[in-house]
């Protein structure tokens, strides 16, 4: 019978617990898709949590691909709390085509999770009905634990915190419960790309260089051994 290695087993258990704690601290898995909002105050890039809110991610990403957020705006900027994007059906200056309007008017079931509302998180706006989210969402400008489990989190900002800081410095006015900028913060345009595709291109480029180097070495050996 093999002796029980208690020290080794405990060490493995500690490593497993530590790995789990690290994964939790890093937050949910971020998909490879990235969206960039180009505003009149700078760019904001964000990614999605498809494993946390798959229906919400699909809906928002389709709105982006259709160009629905172009000419829309941030109607709310509450320093240390949220910067909120307006509903595209009412916030755009450009008219919408039928396909855009059909997608924009869809409501999404509330995909609530245990992901925390901290700075940089993207969280859907909604009415009292938990399944009333459409296209408005907030970018968290600080921690807001009172929102946890009540609003659908679907992604986070990956670049552009300096832009968010600029927005927080703009003059505002209060209208009821909302703190709103006195100037229009326009989403001039938007685009998306896939970080996975870029990674593959880099890997392919590396592979091509290695193959070329290998071909040179093979030819050198051939000439050496078979002159």
Image (cartoon, rainbow, N blue to C red):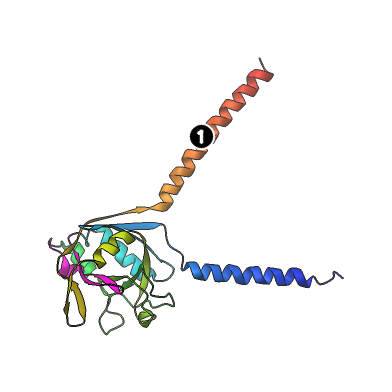
* Camera-side residue of 96 and 83: 83
* Camera-side residue of 34 and 148: 148
Rendered location of residue 108, percent (x, y): 30, 74
Rendered location of residue 225, percent (x, y): 69, 19
Rendered location of residue 42, percent (x, y): 25, 56
Point out the residue furthest to the top here: 227
Q: Left or right? Give the position of 143 relative to 174.
A: right
Q: Which residues are magenta?
A: 71-95
Res. 84 image quadrant? bottom left
Q: Left or right? Give the position of 96 relative to 61.
A: left
Point out the residue furthest to the right here: 1
Looking at the rendering, in which quadrant would you find the N terminus? bottom right
Res. 76 image quadrant? bottom left
Query: Which residue is depicted at the point 26% across and 62% down?
Result: 166
Numbered-mark total: 1
Is 85 colored magenta in this rendering?
yes
- Residue 30 vertical placement versus 114 (above, below): above
- Residue 128 vertical placement versus 125 (above, below): below
Res. 64 image quadrant? bottom left
Rendered location of residue 55, percent (x, y): 35, 70
Q: Which residue is mark 1?
A: 209
* Camera-side residue of 126 and 147: 147
Crowding around mark 1 (Cα neighbors within 10 Å: few <14, some 14 to 19, many 20+) is few
Query: Which residue is depicted at the point 41% across and 49% down?
Result: 197
Q: Left or right? Give the position of 88 relative to 44.
A: left
Is 174 colored magenta in this rendering?
no
Helix, strand or loop at disc 1? helix
């Amino acid at each position: 019978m093999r002796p029980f290695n208690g020290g080794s087993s405990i060490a493995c258990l500690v490593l497993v617990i530590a790995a789990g704690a690290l994964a939790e601290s890093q937050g949910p898995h971020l998909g490879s898709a990235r969206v960039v909002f180009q505003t009149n105050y700078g760019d904001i890039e964000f990614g999605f949590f498809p494993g946390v809110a798959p229906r919400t991610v699909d809906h928002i990403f389709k709105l982006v691909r259709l160009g629905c957020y172009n000419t829309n705006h941030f109607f709310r900027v509450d320093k240390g709390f949220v910067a909120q994007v307006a509903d595209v059906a009412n916030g755009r200056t450009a008219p919408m085509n039928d396909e855009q309007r059909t997608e924009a008017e869809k409501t999404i079931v509330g995909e609530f999770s245990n992901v925390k509302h901290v700075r940089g998180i993207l969280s859907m706006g909604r009415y009292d009905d938990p399944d009333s989210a459409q296209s408005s969402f907030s970018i968290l400008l600080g921690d807001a634990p009172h929102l946890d489990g009540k609003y659908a989190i679907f992604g986070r900002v990956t670049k552009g915190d300096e832009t968010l800081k600029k927005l927080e410095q703009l003059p505002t006015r209060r209208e009821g419960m909302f703190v709103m900028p006195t100037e229009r913060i326009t989403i001039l345009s938007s685009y998306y790309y896939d970080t996975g595709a870029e990674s593959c291109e880099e890997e392919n480029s590396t592979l091509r260089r290695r193959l070329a180097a290998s071909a040179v070495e093979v030819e050198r050996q051939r000439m050496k051994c078979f002159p």
